[in-house]
Amino acid sequence: MPWTRRHLLTIEELSLAEIDQIHATAAAFKKILGRNVKKVPALRGKTIVNLFLEPSTRTRMAFDMAAKRLSADVISLDGASSSTTKGETLRDTAQNIQALNADLIVLRHAASGSPLYLSRILNIPVVNAGDGAHEHPTQGLLDTFTMRERLGDLRGRKVTILGDILFSRVARSNIHALTKMGAAVTLCGPSTLVPGWFTDLGVTVSHDLKSALADAEVVMLLRIQHERQSAGHFPSLGEYTSMFGLNKTRASWLHPKAIIMHPGPINRGVEIDSDLADGERSVILEQVTNGIAVRMAVLYLCFGGQPESVAVVD
Ligand code: CP
């Protein structure tokens, strides 16, 4: 099946076959990234603009590195240094970037649906790098890529996502990816942050930490998204940690071979203890590394590349 999408907006709209294609393409690029010469000419002559109107370390740098490894020219613009601070709209900003002959925009924005909006008014591909509490598709793709590398087939595997689910775009993208891949997903956290209606997405909701962690082969921690909360959803961070923070005792409830994941940024001592974040079961930095190959795959495919042609890009 050929790849046909120009934009990557959500995981919700992807089929399992498309997720498999992105992962296969990322695996091929990961091999290239292991060589002495890591750069391929696949996107030579293309200009990619990283338009990040919300803060980012990992995603922005990984998109930047991915574009450079593919030989594209890349320009990054953040909110604080852009004319959005003078009142320019997203529409005008994006149309001006297109008028400057950019070939693709990677967008991070606080408004859910903003990448979809741009995809409808621009003539160039748009890649979602996180839109409000809606989706963070490349994070979900790199997380599931990392799980597949570690565990193989995810069908029937228990994956527990723990923390602030309500405001997490990472959780939504992972839920869509994992349920398509047949994983048994459990969401856990305070009832204010993990409402029961999430079961509509085909997952289990639990407010009991011990049963949520029991025999899980993957636990993914999420930080509390202060920036998206307008009201207190629990009494204090200390109380959250005492009820739901992952520590050594609680980690002993997991499957003996369980991996510990976190999309970052980590709030050490809040959702996870430092010794676990840095411990041998943690794959947190592997996730970051895999983010480059996965984003290379997404950029390559959105520019019309085909999964099977990665072998001949250099
Ligand atoms: N995981 C993630 O999106 O991290 P950044 O906010 O640093 O990009």
Image: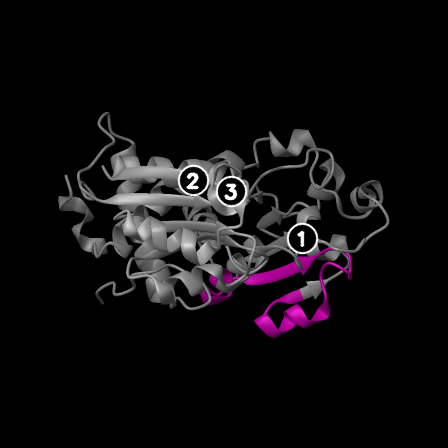
Q: Nearer the viewer, residue 208 or 195?
A: 195
What residue does disc 1 label? Answer: 228
Amino acid type at mark 3: Gly
Residue found at x 43% / y 35% = 61
Element at label 1:
helix
- The amino acid beneath tag 1 is Arg
Q: What residue did someone put label 2 on?
A: 77
Real-space Cα separation, disc 3 to disc 2, in angstroms? 7 Å
121 w.r.t. 217: above or below = below
Q: Quadrant of the N terminus?
A: bottom left
Q: Position of residue 232 (x, y in %)?
A: 81, 53
- The residue indicated by pointer 3 is 79
| Magenta stretch contains residue 308 | no
The magenta-colored residue range is 177-204
Residue farthest to the front, as pictured: 86
Amino acid carrying label 2: it is Leu
Residue 247 screen position, x and y as percent: 73, 38
